[in-house]
Structure formats: C-alpha cells, structure tokens
Image: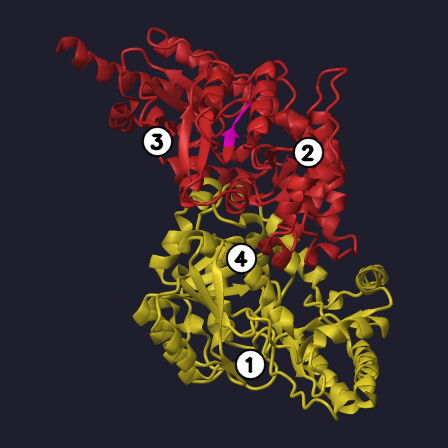
Chain colours: A red, B yellow
Amino acid sequence: MVNSAGERAQVQTTQSEVSADRIDLALGHPSPELLPLELLRAAAARRLGQGDRSFLQYGYEQGDLRFRTQLAGFLSRGYAPRAGCSTEVSPDELFVSGGVSQALDLICSLFTRPGDRVLVEEPSYFLALRIFADHGLRVEGLDTDRHGLLPEALRERLRQDRPAMLYTVPTHHNPAGTTLPEARREQILELCRENGVLLVADEVYHLLTFAGDPPPPLAASAGRGGLLSLGSFSKILAPGLRLGWIQGSPDLLRRLATCGFLDSGGGLAPFTSAVVCSLLEEGAQQDHLHRLRLAYGARARALAASLGRSLGDVTDAVPPAGGFFFWVRLQGVADTEALLPRARAAGVTFAPGIRFSTRGGQREYLRLSFSYYGERQLEEGVNRLAEAVRGFRLPERGS
Amino acid sequence: MVNSAGERAQVQTTQSEVSADRIDLALGHPSPELLPLELLRAAAARRLGQGDRSFLQYGYEQGDLRFRTQLAGFLSRGYAPRAGCSTEVSPDELFVSGGVSQALDLICSLFTRPGDRVLVEEPSYFLALRIFADHGLRVEGLDTDRHGLLPEALRERLRQDRPAMLYTVPTHHNPAGTTLPEARREQILELCRENGVLLVADEVYHLLTFAGDPPPPLAASAGRGGLLSLGSFSKILAPGLRLGWIQGSPDLLRRLATCGFLDSGGGLAPFTSAVVCSLLEEGAQQDHLHRLRLAYGARARALAASLGRSLGDVTDAVPPAGGFFFWVRLQGVADTEALLPRARAAGVTFAPGIRFSTRGGQREYLRLSFSYYGERQLEEGVNRLAEAVRGFRLPERGS
C-alpha cells in the first residue's frame, strides 16, 4: 500500500472532517489508512488496459462468470481455514450484489410483503431494522446469550405462526460480537427449513477473524436451499465499491436474477466487479485481508487493554475474536443513552445499546467500534469515556 | 476512442455471441463499438492517481457533491440547447442512483405499497412494467397519440381515484419514439400535482437527440416538487457502470437519501461516480455524446431508408428524432408476435408490439432497435424482415 504525503494529508482531512476533535467510536467505517487505493488503481489500470470492453455493456443478471469464478475460489479458501473442512463454493451459488444493504433491500422486495414478520436477534444491527421498516415489515427480537441466538427461543416462537424471514449475524455479531456455535447453526437452519422461514445470514464479518477459527459459515449450507448468505467487499476491501454477493441455492438465486429490476438493468456491478476481479486474480485480496486481520486484531486488543485500565472496575470486556465492534456492559450505568451527552462533552461518542434493541432494551450496553481509529486514538477515546462514566456515576453515589 | 486490433476482436466476439448469425433488432443495448473503453481507462487512471481515497469510503447518501456539481453543469448545458431557455440544474436537486432500473425499484419501495395503481403510457417500456409487478402494483395504460400521452386521458382517469404514480417517457419514447409537446408536459405535471400523484419521468433518451430540439425536459420543473426525473449514463456512456441520477425537489430526494438502505450502505456509487466525475471534468462526456448523436442519427436514417426500400408498401416509418428505437406499424400484419417465428427463420428478430402493451394490444406494431448494429447490418436485418413479412402475408392473400 502506498502512503504518499498526498494520501496521508487526505486521510487526515477526511478523518478530521468526520470527528473534528471528537473521537467517534460509534463510527462503523473502515480506517481510511486501510483503504487500498494503490491496489485498486493497479487493478483498474490492468483490467481497463486489456482491450476487453465487455464489462461496459449490460451484464449477466447473476453477475459476470469470470468474477464469480474468482470470488468462489477466494471464498472456498477463506471459508475453510481448518484442514479437512470442506466448504467449496460454486460460482453457480453466487449472485453479485451492490453490498449487504442493497442485497437486504432486494430480498425484502422479492420475498416479503408489508405486514410480514421478520425475526432478528435481540440485539441486532440497527440499520437492517430500518431497511425492514421501509418495507413495512414487523420486526421481532429473539433472545440471545453470549454465544448468540438461542435455538430454543426460535423454536418457541415458531409455534405461534410462520414469519417470512429470520435475519441473523452468526459470526462476530454486530453489535454483540458473539459467534454462534456449529451445533446451534445446524439447529437454526433446520428449524427454518422445517417451517418454511427464509434464513438470511449476514456473514460480512466472517472472513475478518483475528483470533481462532469460527465454525464454517452458514454459507457452507447454502446449496441445500432455504438460506441466503450475504457477503461484501465493504469490510475487506472498500465500502465505496458498493460490491458484495449473495450465496444461495440456484433456485433462490433465480428469483433474484429474474426480477424486473435485474431483467431491465442487467447485473448490478459489471464495471466494479471487473476491477475487483483483476485484484482477485492477482491474489491481492488475500494479502490485503491478511493485513486487515493483523491491524484490526491489534486494535481490538488495544481497546480491550484500555478498557481494562480505565474502566476495569465497571466492565469485564473480553476482546471479540473478529469483526469491527466491542459490546460493553457498564455496571452501575442503567442507561447508556443518558451517558451520551456527558461523553460528547468529554470528546467521545459511542452507539448506545438501545439503538440495537427491538424492544427498547439493551440500555446497560454500548457499542464501541475499533475499525476507524488507530490504537493511540482508541486509548484516548476510552480515557474520555472513563471520564464521562465517572462524572455520570458520582452524583448517583452522592444522592 | 482507441480501436486497437484487440478491441476490435473483442467487439466482434461479443457481437457474435449475442447474435450468432442472427440480427437481433430487439436488443436495446448500445453498440459495442461505441462503448468508450479508452475514455474510462484514462478517467480511472487520473482519478485513482490523485492520492485521494475518499471515494473508497462509505459515501454521502445523496451522492458525492463533487460529482453532483459536475453532473449539474453537464445537465444544465445539455438541457438548454436553445438560446434563452433556462434549465439550470442545481447539485441539490440531484441524487446519484445505480441507473434507471435501480431508481425505479427504490421509488416503488418508498413511494408505493402493493395493490397501489401506477399509470403508464399505452404502449410503455415493458421492463418497467415488470419492476412494477414485482412491487405488487397494478398497472393501467393511458391512451396516447403520435405526440405521446393524452392529457385528456389522464384527466378522465383521475376522476375515478388517486393512483400512486404516473410513469412516463416524455422524450423519444420507448417504444413509440414520440416526444411530448411542451404544452402537454405542463398540463400533465399540473394534473399530477393537483391530484397528489407522483410523476416519474424516465428522461434517459432526452440528451440523445439527433434531429431538432425537444422541449425542455420535465426535469426542468423538478425543483417545484411532485416530480422525479430519471437519468442515466447507460445510454450516453456505458451501461456496465450502473450509474444514473434522480432529479427532484430536495424534499423528495430527502425521502430517498434517508431510507434504511441508503442510511446503512451510504451513497450508491462512490467509486464509479468518482471515475465518471473525472471524465465530466475533462469535458469528455460532452464530446462523446456528440459522437453518439452523429452515429445513432446516421443509423436511424439508414434504418428508415431500408424500411422505405424494402417495406415501403406496408409501412410509412418516419425516423425518430432521438433515442434507440423505431416503432413500426405493418399494414396487413394483424399480429407481429405471430410473425416472429418467420422472422427468426429468416435470421432476424424484433420486439413484437404486444410486449409493450398493458392490455394485450399493440399487435400491429413492432419495435426495431438501431442502437446495437451498424448501418450495413441494419439494412441486412430489414431485408430479412421484409422476406418474413412477404412470406407471412402471401398465404393470407391466397386463402
């Protein structure tokens, strides 16, 4: 990665625009320094210099086969880090999307009707909840523990009626950081299949594992039907590409690829996927992912250490094994939303737990992101947060 | 535009893949030779070589301001070809989309509910009709004449109840080639405003005028509200970019930019719009558009001449003043769909009129596209069509 003076200046400008003096630990963006401009410049120069202009035309609805073949190879390697574990991905099981948000929007349009029920984890990714709301869907949260969704809660819920969909983030959950054990994945998938509920797995953090190996992704079962797994280049390359994929059985993908929107406009990203295809062909995505794992892993550990030093008396935050987020429970703070103004005054922000709740709960939690800032700024952010927490709790003690 | 041997070979490969020996005059794709690979290669090299990586990050929901400013300047010039006509476009009135199909899909998600009624022209763009169907909308066709939609038909229809939306292609209509006169545009806009019906104008062919000047686009009235005008780089640059825009009042655009899908994923095309921004900054889009007008204009005239020579006894096809399509009425052919197998046998295809109808009509029409093929192939295509028509009509005379 090139880090010229010009790039550095730009990164600092962008960062200061976003955060000014404040450290915004609510921000779930990748770090500007980790956006691989030089890799993408080289990939674009290579692909656009080959004299092939097929990717300037309307593209195949499911996405370009050359790109899907490269992506399938990359995922087959990435999804099977453990010897003996077979998670071979076929290009036929991949549909090229404009990222997870676009994928979710399309899935809601085609597989639900306003008034339908969608099950999610409690807590869940708040912006997914907004997409569901735009489609007139009624969202219900299912109980979770420190390993994620409880199959028993799902079984119990399915006794009532048939929801349209279950949306889950099985690995390195946003916001809770949990990773669902293999046995639970199987149980949940079976329950959904038995009851005709579409299982939508947002597996966007799966490849961003920096400690241990997660169980195979739900994507590995996609070929058997009833399941759509969402992936994206936003977390592992660059969000501005708006490029992702949906993995599912050919039957389910056919419904996506033959909808009016796709039939009219063709594939969703011929140009961008051609550039990224070149990057995959060179193995540059794999190398970059390795760098990201090292960088984000170091940040997660630094954030955990800072929390231990500054807030160890009120939290026992365990660093997550992957992803972008740290889910922190603060003892003695009954409502983190009420803490927010004090945190802002101290020069730091976070995402209060209630924002991720389907039922006005999670008030004793807050979400800290370690994706955007470097280690020094994370430490300073935690110091400021500790200052806000102390100021917040002292009056209570005095009263 | 570079036309190296490698590029030529590719173009021929692509073309032969699509059409084999057959000439497919149903195909509404731009001509492979007219896709500006070299312009885009240079623009990507320029933009990705500037050390600015802001477009790799999540983008502003409405779209990048630098890009919207360039686009506004380009549209202000393009929309006001006549002296004294003010059609200044403001960047605030522009929302960056993933093309017209994506824009229509998003508008349906946010401004309609299943069961709502959408009014369209009879005939209308058949793939838009499919997008409406995916959203559970009920489509009703309004009568047109050789100048387009009849305001009287709209007025009459609005006496019954309030549809959610009117979808119209006011300039160089697909398929009919009609261009709505200025007075009708005003009347239709007023009727929609008075009745609270969202007017969605697909103005994707407006800039592709090669004979005369069309009236100002409906986009010129977008600032006053009640109207969304859709534009795209698919017809004037490259469909594979999946890049377009919606022009509307800031009020309407706010609804688009604040939806869950955009809030979650950010702007729809940070990377692609950054590349195209560079192309706009260099004035290359304007130059390319000029080339396209000359090329497509020559093709439209060549197609008209061929029709006159080979089918002059059954059609009085007048060449359209812009766009991609020729709407042909064949006297003595009661159903062009029935003609299709004979045409295929003769080595040519077309889009039968019924495909564009909301009510199983338009059977005496067919749509020929002049966007994909060069003049020599268009002539050969018409010769084959004439052969099919002669074979089709002879038995009738004999019976």
Q: Is residue A287 magenta?
A: no
> What crowding class fits label 1: few (fewer than 14 Cα within 10 Å), some (14-19), or many (20 or more)?
many
Give the image quarter of residue B127: bottom right
In terms of depth relative to the viewer, which is nearer, A77 or B332?
B332
Compared across the picture, whether B194 is left or right of A137 comes to left
Same subunit: marks 2 and 4: no
The region drawn magenta spans A166-170
Same subunit: marks 2 and 1: no
Q: Which residue is mark 4?
A: B133
Chain-order first, disc 3 or disc 2: 3
Q: Secondary structure at mark 1?
A: loop
In three-dimensional space, the C-alpha distance between marks 2 and 1, rounded to whole angstroms, equals 49 Å
x and y percent of residue B72 in the render? 46, 65
x and y percent of residue B214 in the render? 51, 82
In terms of depth relative to the viewer, which is nearer, B50 or A142?
A142
Question: For the residues carrying marks 2 and 1, which lies nearer the camera in this image?
Answer: 1
Q: Secondary structure at mark 4?
A: helix
Chain where mark 1 sits: B
Q: Looking at this rendering, what residue extends furthest in the left direction?
A: A399
> What crowding class fits label 2: few (fewer than 14 Cα within 10 Å), some (14-19), or many (20 or more)?
many
Q: Residue at x 34, y 73 (%)?
A: B159
Q: Secondary structure at mark 3?
A: loop
From this view, report whether residue B356 is shown above or below residue A98: below
Residue B343 visible, this orientation:
yes
In three-dimensional space, the C-alpha distance between marks 1 and 4, rounded to whole angstroms, equals 25 Å
Q: Residue at x 42, y 36 (%)?
A: A129
Res. B178 mark: 1
Mark 3 vs 4: CB contact within 8 A: no
From this view, report whether residue B125 is shown above or below residue B322: above
Q: Which residue is mark 2?
A: A285
Give the image quarter of residue B195: bottom left
